[in-house]
Amino acid sequence: MRLIEWRDRTAPLSAADAPFLALGNGRSHGDVCVNDGGTLLLTRGMDRLIAFDRGTGIVDCEAGILLGDLLHWCLPQGWMLPVVPGTRFITVGGAVANDVHGRNHRVAGSFGRHVLEMDLLRSTGEHLRIGPEEHADLFAATIGGLGLTGLITRVRLRMIPVSSDLMLTESIRFGHLDAVWDINDRLGAEWPYTIARIDCIARGRRLGRGVLVAGRHAPPQPAGTPVPRWRGRSRSLPFDMPFSLVNRHSVRAFNAVYYRAAPLPGRRLQHVHGHLFPLDRLRDWNRIYGRRGFYPYHCVLPHAHARDGVRTLLKRTAASAQGSFLAAMKTFGDLPAPGILSFPRPGVTLALDFANRGPRTLRLLADLDDIVSAAGGALDPGQDARMSVTMFRRGFPQWERFATLVDPAFSSTFWRRMNP
Ligand SMILES: Cc1cc2nc3c(=O)[nH]c(=O)nc-3n(C[C@H](O)[C@H](O)[C@H](O)COP(=O)(O)OP(=O)(O)OC[C@H]3O[C@@H](n4cnc5c(N)ncnc54)[C@H](O)[C@@H]3O)c2cc1C
């Protein structure tokens, strides 16, 4: 793969370097950000904040800026990104191209809903301004478009007002999967941010036990209230483990400790970063999986089949004894995603990570595919390196319309895999 540092958003592409693909911060777990035999355009240097309207919360920025840098700047001014995934170390371009979702999908939808317009560099040399009214088809293909429609150079998006950088949070323990649905419904819009962490090793009457973590933006605190400060410290695993630390015993022990430690009594205040980005405290956490790495398995099941489907997925996972650390389950609301290929859609999403144990793990994942397909669900292309062409086309029935909008000089290892 050739690498080209992309700093100047007005620079032209040279046809000799095709096929192109933009790389954000490389936080996708899969081959949507890989371009074997082609060129990767490294966008992290294209990270300027162009304009910010403090009155309306509308931001204009280059696509390589990190969400964390935007937050660092706008939170103290009372503005927050409307949608954030579980890490702040991703670029705005990557957030658009995977149309990422957060814990508040029920009330905010996906990231792309908050994008007002973008600049897109096509291999023809055109620098197009695209939005819901200008080049609307290309706009819809670029949101969730996995970098295949061209290079996003500038993004204009709308923030939401918040009155502090704190969140009020609550943890609720549930002893069985059946209990989580009622808790989730009860929380409603009063707690916009929710995520259930599920112990996917637990079986029998404990199947799907876990902790539901809820949050909402906190009002300013009265003078004298002790408030948590964000120190911004994170630890890092300095090297790949020679073997995976993730095995049946370590997962069982970790999941059990997590379950027993919650709920903390009552509600508590947390800094936005501490609450929404717990994994960012351990940089390079993926190294615990050792040199063979891990397979992410991120799926969505429509509401009508979600309860049965999630139960079956967890049963199969528990029976395999390959269970991942806490699975993350979130509810997607009914707000439609604007992207032709967007992954978020009404239903329930489950994210599991499995240490790579070769054919054994692949067999398990194929079984999970059958369950997801039978439920009419889909896998997240942004977190995948193995889904079949059939699975992709079933999960994204508009793929043919999308394909007509792909820039012919852009491609990725993922896209070639899906179009053999
Ligand atoms: C700890 C952790 C937690 C996560 N939690 C969530 C979550 O809760 N919800 C969620 O949705 N995702 C989640 N993710 C996944 C992550 O948010 C996405 O994969 C995100 O898209 C990565 O952004 P990136 O900047 O690293 O982009 P990359 O991974 O580098 O690229 C992603 C895609 O975007 C394209 N792209 C990047 N920049 C541009 C550009 N300028 N122009 C055109 N295309 C571009 C690339 O070609 C590629 O197809 C999580 C990831 C981690 C590591």
Image: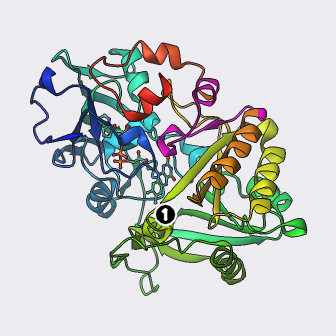
Q: What residue sits 64% from the left and 71% below the top? A: 170
Question: Which stretch appears magenta?
Answer: 374-394
Q: Along the line of sight, which residue is nearer the eye, 261 or 149?
A: 149
The image quarter in which residue 79 lies? bottom left
Q: Residue at x 45, y 50 (%)?
A: 29
Q: Is residue 144 visible?
A: no
Q: Is residue 383 magenta?
A: yes
Between 403 and 188, the one lying in front of the other is 403
Q: Classify 234 as above or below 312.
A: below
Disc 1 under 8 Å from ligand 1? The reply is: no
Tell me if 203 is positioned left or right of 117 in this view.
right
Which quadrant, please, contains the N terminus?
top left
Q: Residue at x 42, y 83 (%)?
A: 223
Q: Quadrant of residue 42?
A: top left
Rendered position, 140 above or below 326: above
The percent position of residue 67, horizontal first and vertical second, equals: 33, 53
| Quarter occupied by residue 326 | bottom right
Q: Which residue is mark 1?
A: 276
Judge from the rendering whether residue 200 lies leftward or rightward of residue 141; answer left or right. right
